[in-house]
Structures are given as C-alpha cells and as structure tokens.
Image (cartoon, rainbow, N blue to C red):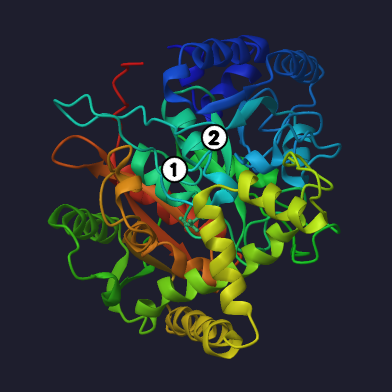
C-alpha cells in the first residue's frame, strides 16, 4: 500500500512498530503532490521544511516521546498563518505575505510532531463554495462522474484541503468552517470534515473572515483520524478571547461505536422544496443505519431553519467588511501603482479594487450596507435577533433529550467546475442551506461519506452535536461510518 494512502491511525501504528519512518511517509506525500498539479490543490510546497520536520519526528519517535500525530504529514489551508511561509488566503491583496508568526492551531500541530507539507487552495478569504474564487485558480476534484471526463468542483472554501485528502496528497489537512467550508467540500470528495464547537480551536493567526462564525477543524480520511487530529488542534489560547478555557478530552477514546439508546433528531424543516430524490434517499438510509445500530430516531422541528441562510448572508458579510478593512495597501501585501496626483484615498481605492476578487468585493459592499446607519436596524440587528432564535431551536431540541441531529450535508452532489460562474450569487449561497445553521448556533458538526450518487459521486450526511460534546458526536459519526462502509476512492486520472 502506497504510504501516502494511509490513514493517520494506520500510519501511527506503522511508525510505532518502526515499519516506516516519517521521512518515508513525507516523501511519499511529496511525490504524490508533484504528480497532482492537475488538481491545483496544493499552492505552496514546503518540501525542505517537511523533510526536516520528518527527521525531527523520527528522532522523537526513536526517543520514545511520540504523540498520536508525531510524524504525520499534513496539508494546511492557506488561511492559516505559518511562520515564514506564504500565507495569503488565496487573495491577491495579500500577495507574497509571509507571516512572522504562527497560528495557534498549526503551532499546536507542529508541537505534537506533525509535519507541514505545504499550503492548500481555497476560496479567497473563505468566501465561496467551489474553490473557484482563488488567486491561484480553481481546484479540480479528483472525482469524476461515471462515463464523463468533465471537471468537477471539490467544494469550497476548503476545496484544496478536501481534494488533497481525497487524492492522498497528505494524510489529513486543516480546514476552516464559517458556514460549511469544512463539511461541504468533505461531502463532495468522500472525506470526513469536522467543524468543532465555536471556541474549541483558537482563531489566533487564522486570517479572519467572520469572527463570530469562523472555526478551524480537521479534514481527514476517517472519523477516527478526525478525533485524533482535533485533539492536537484544540485547546485554550489566551491570544483568542473567544477560545474556551475547558479541558480537551481524549476524543479518540469516545469512539466505542456503541450508540444504543442515543436519540437522533431528523429535523423536518430540512426537507426543503426541490430536495433531490438521491439526497432524500441517502438521508433516509442514514437514519435507518443509526436505527439499526440501536439509536432511537425521532422527527423534530427546528422552526427557524428557513431564516438561517438569509441571516448568515447578513452577519457573515457584515463581519467580513469589518475584518477586511485592514487591507489597505499600507501594511500588508499588494499595493496598486499610483498615478501622479493620487492621494491616500486613491491608494486605498485602487489597491482594494485590484486586490480583492469580485465575490469578496460583493461581500464587503453587502456588509458595509447592512451595517450602515440607515439600515443597521432593518438588517444587522434583525439578523442578530433571528440568530438567537435559531440557536434557541437547537437548545430546545437538546433539552428535549436529542443527542445529535442528522441531515444531508449538501443539497446535491458535486457540481461541474465553472458552474459557479453561471450561477447567480443567491443560487451559489443556496449550497450552504444545510450547513450555516450550526455556525449561527456555535455548534459542532461533521460530514461523513455515506454513499454514491447514481453516477458514482460521493455524498455526505451531516451530524450536528451538542456544544463541547465532540466526543459523543464523533462516536455517532463513527457508528454511521461503520454502517455506511464507504470505501470507494476517486479513480486516478491526473
Ligand atoms: N460558502 C460559505 C460562504 O461563502 C461558507 C464559507 C466558509 O465556511 N468559509 O460564506
């Protein structure tokens, strides 16, 4: 078995048994990356650093001081600042930005002994659902529909991470999820994506999109790997005031596979108009699998669900317009060439017009509009109120004894590359209909590969859990993964 195709858990076992070295694992991934430029998933390769870190990991393993992640080669979404490595959120405005500091999440991973392979493609600043809005160009999914060689999207915004994991360019990757950017790409690529409870992972050093919604999480080949990797990413951080000061449990120890007596809610409001038969069938089958595993599956109501998408698309752009005001050509990255007579205003205007892509400009304008004095009450304040109601829907369900909620992750299988350009912004935003709700409520959620569409493409189911109970959520996901037996890999064409 090629070493780059291993899971974290299998690689850990082989490293411990001295059957392989981290250098060998790392080299296998670097070779796979080199052969996969057609996917455009990896945008910066840090080969030398990777091999140095692998050697250090091997020495650590030999010294008997390894953690579960020691020697495991990872890819990192371009949204994470990595000291001394270009980190530009796939934006032209951060052209060439090389941070002099390290995000807390990646620092935690490196101190656990994980190995940094490089930076992964994404939608600019995390805004998008197809990884097409990137200064590096689009990521191409390793998957193709049966009998077709049309290029497909790997989802977004963490599409580079999803494609890299699905194509075995790394053992796992980091992602971030503001409105679904870990779970949707995971669903499109047959991988596992976990968005933790808001505050579980530090946001420090992760380039901000919408601060009250952003959260980092693992993108992996299996649920067990998600449990292992989350343990290494999470933890309290004084540098992020919203990071929770609570202990990080052993998530892997929660994976017993026993979900007997658990109460799983099926929210009727997610059966949206036009939900395809394929997705509806997956959902019913997922519910049946959990029932067969001994869970009690019940219908529930989350009455404010229909308002989640519009609420998200007020709050996220509002926070983005504020967060992105710092990119002005003075302190970071790109600055426009100025003409004689241009003053500071022209510098700001030209730099931001050149540096931000169309979608980012749309969000900044939308955000500035909903925050402006005349419209603040009508849009932003209203959205904040509705957000509270959405959160309350979940609280009521959990207070009624629900342990987890099962929904589809996406309304369709992966769409064609380029389709995003043909869609209206609102059609594009509809992709996030099942994922944004839990971001608004600050809850953890996971996408688990559950089956294939009629034309052979992966589909995912989403489980939503109680705050801070990722262990329990992962265990339910583990039971679902076991029952679904999703074992298909993308057939190699690249
Ligand atoms: N597609 C959503 C958006 O564009 C989600 C993005 C994300 O989670 N970063 O806002």
Q: Residue 403 carries which label?
A: none
Ligand 1 contact, mark 2 (Cβ < 8 Å): no
Find the distance from the CA under tag 1 to the CA under tag 2. Answer: 18 Å
Q: Can residue 469 be seen in this view?
A: no
Residue 485 point in image, percent of width and height: 29, 38
The residue labelled by disc 1 is 192
Q: Quadrant of the C terminus?
A: top left
| Residue at x 38% of width, y 47% of height | 448
- Disc 2 is placed on an element classified as loop
- From this viewpoint, is residue 167 visible? yes
Bin the neighbour count of mark 1 within 10 Å (Cα to Cα): few under 14, some 14-19, many 20 and up: many
Q: Nearer the viewer, mark 1 or mark 2?
A: 2
Residue 109: x and y in percent read 72, 37
Task: Name the image quarter holding residue 97.
Answer: top right
Q: In this view, does 253 lie to the left or right of 342?
A: left
| Residue 121, numbered circle | 2
């Amino acid at each position: 078995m090629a070493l780059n195709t291993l899971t974290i858990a299998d690689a850990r076992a082989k490293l411990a048994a001295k059957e392989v070295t981290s250098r060998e694992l790392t080299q296998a991934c670097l070779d796979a990356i080199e052969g996969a430029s057609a996917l455009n998933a990896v945008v910066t390769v840090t080969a030398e650093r990777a091999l140095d870190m692998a050697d250090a990991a091997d020495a650590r393993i030999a010294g008997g001081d390894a953690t579960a992640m020691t020697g495991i080669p990872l890819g990192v979404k371009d949204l994470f600042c990595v000291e001394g490595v270009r980190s530009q959120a796939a934006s032209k405005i951060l052209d060439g930005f090389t941070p002099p500091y390290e995000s807390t999440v990646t620092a935690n991973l490196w101190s656990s002994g994980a190995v940094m392979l490089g930076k992964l493609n994404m939608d600019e600043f995390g805004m998008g659902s197809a990884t097409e809005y990137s200064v590096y160009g689009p990521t191409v999914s390793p998957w193709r529909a049966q009998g077709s060689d049309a290029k497909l999207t790997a989802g977004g915004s963490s599409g580079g991470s999803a494609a890299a994991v699905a194509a075995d360019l790394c053992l796992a990757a980091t992602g971030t999820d503001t409105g679904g950017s870990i779970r949707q790409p995971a669903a499109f690529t047959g991988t596992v994506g976990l968005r933790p409870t808001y505050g579980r992972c530090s946001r420090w050093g992760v380039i901000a999109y919408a601060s009250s919604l952003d959260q980092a999480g693992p993108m992996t080949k299996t649920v067990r790997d998600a449990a292992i990797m989350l343990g290494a990413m999470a933890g309290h951080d004084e540098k992020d005031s919203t990071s929770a000061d609570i202990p990080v449990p052993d998530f892997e120890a929660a994976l017993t596979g026993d979900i007997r007596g658990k109460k799983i809610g099926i929210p009727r409001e997610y059966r949206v108009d036009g939900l395809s038969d394929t997705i509806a069938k997956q959902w019913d089958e997922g519910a049946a699998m959990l029932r067969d595993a001994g869970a009690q599956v019940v219908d529930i109501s989350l009455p404010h669900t229909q308002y989640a998408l519009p609420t998200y698309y007020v709050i996220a752009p509002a926070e983005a317009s504020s967060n992105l005001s710092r990119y002005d050509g003075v302190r970071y990255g790109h600055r426009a060439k100025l003409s004689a007579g241009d003053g500071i205003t022209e510098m700001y205007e030209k730099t931001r017009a050149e540096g931000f892509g169309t979608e980012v400009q749309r969000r900044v304008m939308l955000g500035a509009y909903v925050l402006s004095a005349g419209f603040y009450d009508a849009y932003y304040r209203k959205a904040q109120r509705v957000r509270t109601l959405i959160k309350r829907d979940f609280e009521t369900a959990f207070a009624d004894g629900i342990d987890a909620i099962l929904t589809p992750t996406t309304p369709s299988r992966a769409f064609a590359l380029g389709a995003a350009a043909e869609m209206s912004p609102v059609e594009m935003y509809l992709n996030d209909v099942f994922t944004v709700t839990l971001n608004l409520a600050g809850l953890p959620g996971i996408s688990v590969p559950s089956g294939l569409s009629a034309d052979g493409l992966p589909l995912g189911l989403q489980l939503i859990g109680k705050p801070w109970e990722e262990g329990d959520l992962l265990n339910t996901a583990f039971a679902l993964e076991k029952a679904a037996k999703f074992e298909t890999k993308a057939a190699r064409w690249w």
